[in-house]
Amino acid sequence: MAIVPVVILIAVFFIDWISGLILLVTGPLIPVFMSLIGMRAQQQVQKQWSTLRYLSTHFLDAIQGLRTLKLFNQSDRKHSDIAHVSDRFRISTMGVLKIAFLSGFVLELFASIATALVAVEIGVRLIEGHIGFQVGLFVLLLAPEYYLPFRMFGAQHHAGMEGAESAGRIFAILDSDDLLNKVSFSDSNSIIDQDKTNIYSQNAHVNQNSSKRYHEEETGLQALEKEVHYPLVFQDVTFSYLDKRSPVLTKCNFNLPGGKRTALVGLTGSGKTTILRLLTRQLPAESGAIFLNGITAKEMDENTWLRNMAVVSQTSWFFDDTVLANLRAARLLASYEEVLVASRAAGAHDFIEKLPEGYQTPTGEFAARFSGGERQRISIARAFLKDAPILILDEPSSALDPESEEKINSDLDKMMVGKTVFLIAHRISTVSRADRILMLENGRITAQGTHEQLLAKCNLYYQMVSAYSGKIS
């Protein structure tokens, strides 16, 4: 665009200065109008990519935390959020396409009008004999070539906007002195924040109705469970994975007494994780039945089933959102005061208050800014907030030092009061707190009783305790 039009303009000025003057005046008009439209297009492209960026990260976050969403009955809400963001991206993309087509129309229109203007003035002068035929034809042939680079530049400019937006974010990260600090993009972040606000505000009414309905059902189920002696029962449950020759569980039978703490122990690979997945409806039983309040898993709706359970796992997932939003994943409409009560009960309030923005501090991807003990405390606070009648603990103190383990066990003791608790653990310090211990061996419950009873009558349990502590206590 910098060379070809200039060369053509100089050549035309030498042979016909009037046509050269028309080219000189009309040529720059194309980039001017292209810039006017381009400023609007730039805003649309930026908004489109911001929405796409939020959509992709939001979707990835939802996929990675799908297990947590299912356990807290929030998968439907997340589904509606993703659908809403997808619709915003569709609208934004159509806006970009509209401006792109408008820009192409303007470029072609002005190039055609300018070429026609040159053709008209040459035709008039040919009729009056003020210009020769060869010169007029030569200028007419050069006119489209003069405007072609401007049109191509306009098309490439719009095509390059998306690449420029992406490259801008990449170079901002590469040029950052500290990659651990969050890179600030003022325009993009404002658009993303606006998208988040719109998402939650437009879905608030739906979520409020859903949460009210869940709360009503939950209240009725909690009242029912107080009357049931065995809220959870495994009856002849068999399960095998496709890549396994023999079943992981074979006619497994046990029950969880209401209001009691039951611990499940066993060697690695004995089927403890499989039992957890069956309990939380991540896997269907191959045969047999699992009862909740006398109703089988096949007869009860999955959301209703999970609404009765709060799970604290050894690897809890945290979404790339604020600490408050991650806590409210357990109960969307929980008040701020209820969140504070749950956090204090879990021993998480003190360190959350010391964060730069308190409960509004972003957790970051994978909650990397928190230690293992802090993540577990937030996870326990989230389970506190759900306040389900059945509490399932999957090695909640794993990978923690003894001091942190003792503090978390103390927090869990508060949480277990009046609830049906199912502990899946390896640490004897955790297991010994249970009212009853189940020994899982080769896919079956081979022994059950208190810590002292199993030490006396179960050789495998005796060996496990000896291996863990080096002595019997």
Image: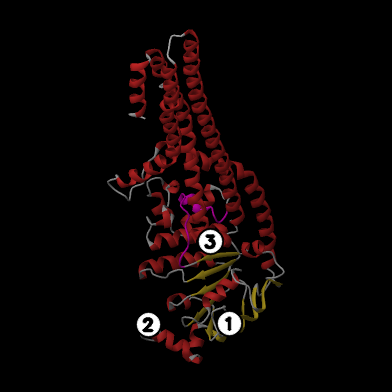
Q: In this view, does 21 lie to the left or right of 238?
A: left
The circle drawn on residue 249 is: 1
> How far is the residue under mark 1 from the one under mark 2?
28 Å
> How far is the residue under mark 2 from the one under mark 3?
33 Å
* Mark closer to the observer (1, 2): 1
Counting other residues with Cα less than 10 Å from the Cα at mark 2, is it few (<14), some (14-19), or many (20 or more)?
A: few
Please name the residue shown 52% across and 75% down the image: 273
**Circle 2 residue:** 469
Q: The C terminus appears in which quarter of the rendering?
A: bottom left
Question: Residue 156: horizontal and vertical position, in percent?
Answer: 43, 36
**Circle 3 residue:** 68
Q: In which quarter of the image is residue 184?
A: top left
Q: In this view, does 405 lie above or below 17?
A: below
The circle drawn on residue 95 is: none
In what element is the residue under mark 3?
A: helix
Q: In this view, does 218 lie to the left or right of 436?
A: right
Question: Residue 461: horizontal and vertical position, in percent?
Answer: 47, 86
Of 179 and 318, nearer the camera is: 179
Please name the residue shown 57% across and 42% down the image: 90
* Mark closer to the observer (2, 3): 3
Residue 274 in view here: yes
- The kind of residue tagged 2 is Ser
- For marks 1 and 3, the one nearer the N-term is 3
> How far is the residue under mark 1 from the one under mark 3?
24 Å
Which residue is at the far left?
177
User: What are the residue bounds of the magenta stretch?
Assistant: 314-331
Q: In this view, does 401 lie above or below 365?
A: below
- The kind of residue tagged 3 is Thr
Is residue 321 magenta-colored? yes
Please name the residue shown 59% across and 53% down the image: 79
Is residue 345 magenta-colored? no
